[in-house]
Amino acid sequence: MDGTAGTLQTATWAQKLDHKTMTRRVLYQTEDIHPEFIVASSQIHRFMVSCQRPFALLEEANVVKLPCQLTRLRFTIALAVSAIFVAGVADTALAQTSPELDFLNDSLAKRANHGDRQTRKECDQEFNSDVETASATVFVLLSGDQKATNVKFRPEVPAAGSKVPKAGRSGLSPEDFSELIAQNQLFVQAEAAKNGQPDHSIKPSKVKAFDLTFFICSKSKAPNWGSYFWNTTIPVEWSSFAGQLVVRDSANAQIAPGTVALQLVRPAPGYDAVSFTVILGIALACGVVLLVVMFLLIEVANGSSPLNKDLAFDFKTVLIIPSTATAAVLGTLVTTTILPSDTLFMPKGQYAALNVLFGLIAVLAGIVYNNYRKAWIFLIGAGVALGAGGGEAVAILFVLKEMALQGSLPAGSAIIVQIAIAVVWLLITILAAVKVVKEINKPGRLAAEYPLA
């Protein structure tokens, strides 16, 4: 009986153990508990079992230590710890960024160019007397998890809450700015860049490039080039625009719009070539006129024979090279330090190119003369160098005009400085030309007879 009873008790205990094990196994196989939760619970269980002292009370002597066999108390602890862990992951996953459009570009400062008759067809009939266009490429980032399906761009001039932009010495008054808006129509056309999707959509957390074309349609014809030079202010209706460019999704108001500073500079007609050509033409005309005048003075006094003699005269002592080189250096300094970047008559690089060109012409004339020492070379070199000096003086006058039109220098002060520069250049040129004529008309001597000191 005792053996039988012992066998019976052992069998009963095995059935209970098997019942507990099967129950737990069935519990783990239900769809209510995620497999990752089971793995996490098992790992936590192994950790608690390994720490024998703190968790010794949790161990039951009649439970076989299998990875997935948990006691009720241990199961409760594992469930609580796992719930905290899963809750933390869920909170992180649910933390989402609010959808927003944002420009990755810096501020946009573009120069408008006058369009042709075909371009004016993009404007309304009321504003098709003249049109200017400017282009830019922008990169727009969409943050968040929502898709923008219909991205639109709109220029706001001036920006909301900003002051009226200045144009000219005294700036634009609110009335003048209202006149500027009434006389012009400003809008923008956008196309997706060639390397992206052709539509106006942006996927979540993506960057997309757009090619923009700005249109400024006007009710009146553009003023001629001379009106910019002779007037002290820019015509109100042809002032530049300053404000911001806004991008938004017209199909989803929940996506916050993005903004970037925008400036559209409206230069004088013929910005790319006219002013540059005018200054070069003035320099050439000055050189030719001075050369002809000096030749006639020599011809009237002594005929053409003095032009064939040798000279030992130093080119620098006639103020030819010093005056032209000084003007070139002065023009370069003014162009690179004071001249505004948004010029009206020609690009800033063309101003710098003229300064370098005129300075090199004066130096080259002196080098050629020093190699040959002939009177006729001296005469031609003097005419060329003095003409370059005249061109440099005119370039400086243009720089001062740029500063006056854009408010960097008062118009009255600019006029005074321009007059002073013109008078100084005229005096130096007359003195240099007289000196050249006198030197050539001196009795002919060979260069060896009076070498340079």
Image: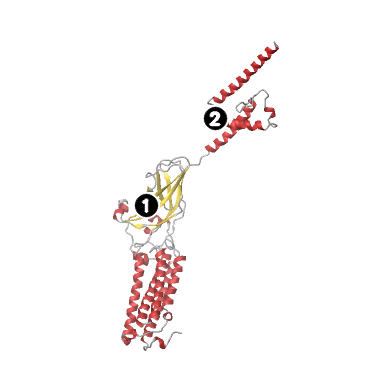
Could you say where residue 164 lies in the image, as x and y percent from the top left? 44, 56
Q: Nearer the viewer, residue 217 or 57?
A: 57
- Please state which amino acid type lies under the numbered disc 2: Pro
Provide residue 372's location: percent of width, then percent of height: 38, 80
In this figure, which colouring scheme has been used for the structure? Answer: secondary structure
Residue that appears at 64% across and 33% down = 47
Q: Which residue is mark 1?
A: 213
Which numbered disc flags the more N-terminal residue, 1 or 2?
2
Q: Amino acid at mark 1?
A: Thr
**Residue 35 — which label?**
2
Q: Are marks 1 and 2 in contact (CB under 8 Å)?
A: no
Count every numbered label the image shows and give the total: 2
Q: Residue at x 31, y 52 (%)?
A: 126
How busy is the neighbourhood of tag 1: few (under 14 within 10 Å), some, or many (20 plus)? some
Position of residue 256 measured from the top left corner of the image (x, y, whole percent):
46, 44
Quarter of the rendering containing residue 233: bottom left
